[in-house]
Image: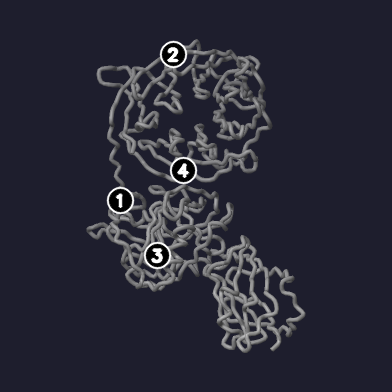
Amino acid sequence: MRNLYIILSIIFLVPLILGTAGTVDAETIEWKDMEQKEVVPAYKKWTIQFSAPIAPSSFTSENVFVYNSDGKRVIGTKLSLSDDRMKGYISAPKGGYIKGDYELIINEKVKGSRKGKAIKDPVSFTFHVEPEKIAIQQLMDQSSEGVVIVKGYNEHGEYIKQGSGFSIANGLILTNFHVVRGTKSVKIQTQSGKVVPIEGIVSMAEEFDLALLKPEENLNLPQLHLGNFEEVEVGEKVYAIGSPQGLMNTVSEGIVSGLRYQQVDTSLFDIINIIQTTTPISSGSSGGPLFNQYGKVIGVTTSGYQTGNLNFAVATSGFAKLWERTNSRYELDEIEVLDVDLTSDKYIDEQQPTGNKVDETPEPIVSTFSIPDIMTNVIQHPTEPVVYGVGVENEIIKVNLETEEVQTLSVDHTPERLYFANDELYVTLLKEEHDAMWWEEDQKGAFAVVEPESFTIKQKVDIALDPFDLVATEDHVYISSGSGQHTSMVSYNRSNGYKEVDRTDIYQYHFLEIDEALQQIYAIDWDISPTMKAYPYNNGSFEDNYRKPHHDKDFNLDEKMVLTSDGTYLINASGQVFTTSTHQERNLEPVTTIEPFDEIRLDPSQNQFFISQEDQIIAFDEKTMMLQDRYYLREKPDSFFRTEQGLYTMKQRKVEGSNIPHMVFHKFEYH
């Protein structure tokens, strides 16, 4: 028998239609030199035409396989032969190939069934996968039936909370863990209106906020295919299907605005991949699928605990993929569930339809003290439980929150803005009030450098500028002007007695924030309309500055802004979060939003930051911008502070036995 020959063709996952290609003598073909790069969609399969029947025992995954661009075998491809064994089929893995280059290999161990004659040469055939994009209507048509409402009930059978979920392996339902946490029983409602209780939880991962539910009966829902986090790209279009406010299978559209990573400590995975998206995710949508533009589920949407506007999804890499592979081997009735008590309420989220509310009981006050002074423009020492503020009558005030010790420092001129750097306290000093008609050539002012431990003035520097705000590095101090309209920001050298180094144009009343790693000063104009600008610098000398034109018309910016402790993001009090970068096109670009706030405090040791909003203090993870905790107070504070010992609030009020306003400090235990 002559050597076997092979003809490769592409078909859809629909009945095969082969062309009438002529027979080619295998002796004349060198397959290893064939560099045919066919572009194929993710769900197409290969058909192999042999010149003689093939032995089924040789047409196996050991002899026929596909490599990806990393040189690893693709898991899950399926092999089969036609009835006459003249054709072999290589089907795509469940969920399809991801975008990229592949190599199909058929080695010399594939043999004929008659005399065991092997193919002449191993086949090495390269191809490129380009998944087909899907329209939103097509997505709904093929996927919406696989999305369900997940309803939680208390021990009295009362409906208390609701989220979303979707079908994966063998009729199991994937959702967020916090959707079912705190419930006594859970039911699944399908798009057709059918309601089925769950038998229990098959698997759960609290750190990933994922849970896999087993309904009491197979709902025969279409299985949604899980995509890969590796193929998610910032800027690509995504879709979310969920049931916000109980509105069944509402679809929303957005883009991937960022990819985040969070360290965890589990036995199998140490990283949570998080997808940040502009797709609206409202209360009741938690646990629903986030689709890429190819129809694959790349994330499980989460509303971020108590708020639905954070727009994050836990990627379906990690546990979700593991559960899909593990449970796809079994029938639904063969899958066991865990004995889990869901009534222990760790996560608080989602609307509560019966009117049961999140516990808003104010945090208990541990201790209270007051001082007979008024403090404004208060800042906190970066490492110690000490705060500094501007008092009345040309005073600076220092308060130790733990010892309750109070110190005052008198200065010659009116103090306004404070900044802590280099283990020094910098204070702007006004010699006259700010005035738009006080031109730059006539301006004068000063700033003081204060030794924080002894709380004494180390140096006072007179400057030819009306100072408004300031920032400092190890080598320089930068001050913006508060008068003269089109005026200057000036740099001063610390090493030579704070002599002026350089000036750059700026409008009056710009608040400043500095990123030493990127050597950029961020400024926000609060005099006319809020506009953010970037001022690159090098050793005290200013380079070309620029603004992002969309800020003043697209965002309701606030004067307050702060860099995260690692300098990755710039957070504005409006709730808008921006990127930071040395590249102009990537600098000051919006990435997500958090809740608007009054004040913000960083806690670098815990990778956290805290904001105050009315009568609440809210904790966020600064890597993911995910809400972590919420504290309720008795009233809105003027300011607040976070230390290792607890949370402190400050409020101006009259105290018993005095008609003079005091600053009252409350301490709350931090948990």
**Disc 2 residue type (three-letter):** Leu
* Alpha carbons under labels 3 and 4: distance apart: 30 Å
Q: Residue at x 40, y 24 (%)?
A: 386
Q: Would you say 441 lies left or right of 306 here? A: right
Q: Which residue is mark 2?
A: 409
Q: Residue at x 68, y 83 (%)?
A: 4
Tags 3 and 1 touching, CB below 8 Å: no
The location of residue 314, given as percent across then percent down, is: 46, 54
Q: Residues within 10 Å of mark 4 (few under 14, many from 20)?
A: many
Q: Which residue is mark 1?
A: 345
- 569 over 193 or under it: above or below: above
Say whether disc 4 or disc 1 marks the residue closer to the N-terminus. Answer: 1
Quarter of the picture containing the N terminus is bottom right
Q: Which mark is residue 316?
A: none
Q: Residues within 10 Å of mark 1 (few under 14, many from 20)?
A: few
Q: Which residue is mark 4?
A: 594
Say whether disc 3 or disc 1 marks the residue closer to the N-terminus. Answer: 3
Q: Residue at x 55, y 41 (%)?
A: 578
Q: Nearer the viewer, mark 2 or mark 4?
A: 2
Q: Nearer the viewer, mark 4 or mark 1?
A: 1
Q: Would you say 543 lies left or right of 662 here? A: right
Q: Which residue is mark 3?
A: 173
Q: Would you say 276 lies left or right of 115 here? A: left
- The answer to which image quadrant residue 34 occupies is bottom right
* Alpha carbons under labels 2 and 3: distance apart: 64 Å
Q: Residues within 10 Å of mark 3 (few under 14, many from 20)?
A: many
Quarter of the picture containing the C terminus is top left
- 564 over 345 or under it: above or below: above
* Alpha carbons under labels 2 and 4: distance apart: 38 Å
